[in-house]
Image: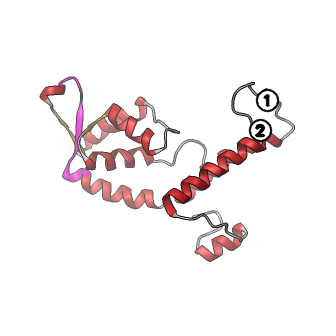
Amino acid sequence: MRKSGPPKGLISYLVLELLEEKPRYGYEILKEITEISGGHWEPSYGSVYPILYKFEEKGWAERVEREEESDRKYFELTEAGEEELAEKRREAGGKASEFADIILGFYHVYVGFATDERFELEPPADGWRYDETFSSWIIEQLIRHHERDFGEFERIDATPEEFYDREGVEEDGE
């Protein structure tokens, strides 16, 4: 179970991947991460810029001066940055369980707001509500995205224990 936020190292990994593609500046990286998330997540300036400066300090990235945009601080990946990216790819590859935990955790809180009598939230007259209809919309969007990216969605008829056993992972996902 995670305490909060995205899996540790996720933003660093994304920044390295984006710098490998081409030299970028901080705001451009923020916007690209927002686009990757479908517009649902934007890390703060306070997380991306310190990462860029840390990468520069460690020799993983270096500043690139552009005459036509002298006011922007572009960074590009160095050879040492390529090596770090290879390590981060291995690291990030092992964080699927943490991601699933975050997604399911927030969904459970959403449903809790809708169904747990301890919560007495006042829904806006013309906005999102914590209820079955909006919960269904969230699930529908997940299925649509799944089908767009992976093909036809097929339900999995297995308990969590059966699924973990079949996929060869520990029950806590590690």
Where on the picture, by quarter, is residue 158?
bottom right
Does the magenta segment cover residue 47?
Answer: no
Where on the picture, by quarter, is residue 53?
top left
Residue contact between numbered discs 2 and 1, judged by CB atoms under 8 Å: yes
Q: Which residue corresponds to mark 2?
A: 113
Badge 2: residue crowd in 10 Å (few <14, some 14–19, many ≥20):
some
Q: Which residue in the rendered view is the most extreme toward the left?
A: 67
- In-front residue for pair 24/12: 24
Residue 93: x and y in percent read 44, 61
Q: Which residue in the rendered view is the most extreme toward the right?
A: 117
Magenta-tinted stretch: 70-81
- In-front residue for pair 148/45: 148
Q: Residue 121: which disc?
A: 1
Type of amino acid at the residue the image marks with label 1:
Leu
**Residue 97, above or below 27:** below
Label 2 to label 1, Cα distance in Å?
Answer: 7 Å
**Residue 168, above or below 119:** below
Q: How is the image coloured?
A: secondary structure
Left or right: residue 27 compared with residue 96 = left
Q: Residue 67: which disc?
A: none
Type of amino acid at the residue the image marks with label 2:
Phe
